Image (cartoon, rainbow, N blue to C red):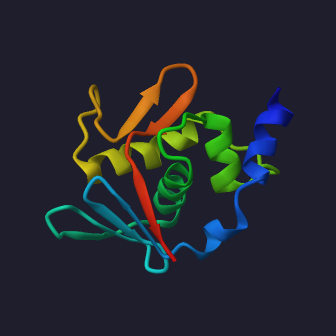
Amino acid sequence: RRVLSLARIESIDPGEAAVRIYRFSGWTLHCHERRLDSPDGKSTLLDKRDFEVLKALLMFPRQVLTRQHLIAMVWGSDKHVENRTLDRPVTRLRRHFGDDVKFPVLLKTVVGVGYRLDADVDKSF
């Protein structure tokens, strides 16, 4: 089962690497700068892990990504990373979004499974 789920990660569209800008729910992520612009025009430079977690979620909008999927996509499937390591970037992203921890709007927790970005995403190349 784990092998099949990780196969989904390895089959990511190679064109995804060419995406320069993701737009979702009024937010804009500029990939080459790792800059996140809020709907009210404030810019934040994301650290590498926060950026990679957000980009992974943006590649699969409205789909649940397991903690293992996200860890494999961000840290690499050949690395051993504790599941809890993912908590810090998720918490920081929620703060950037202004999401309520108990009732997040954009970055939802699917208890016992993983996370889902609850937004439609437009991509610019």
Above or below 33: residue 63: above
**Viewer-side residue, 14 vs 29:** 14
Q: Residue furthest right?
A: 3
Name, please, the residue furthest toward the left. Answer: 40
Query: Looking at the picture, does residue 17 appear above or below residue 97?
Result: below
Query: Residue 109 versus residue 123: which sits nearer the camera?
Result: 123
Q: Where does residue 101 sit, x and y in percent of width and height?
A: 29, 32
Residue 109: % across, % down: 44, 29
Vertical placement of residue 52 versus 86, above or below: below
Task: Say left or right for 111 vs 8.
Answer: left
Which residue is drawn at the image coordinates 49% and 46% (left, top)? 61
| 42, 81: nearer the viewer | 42
Residue at image position (49%, 80%) is: 32
Relative to 34, 18 lies left or right? right
Residue 4 x/y as whole percent: 83, 34
For the point 22% across and 46% down, which residue is it? 98
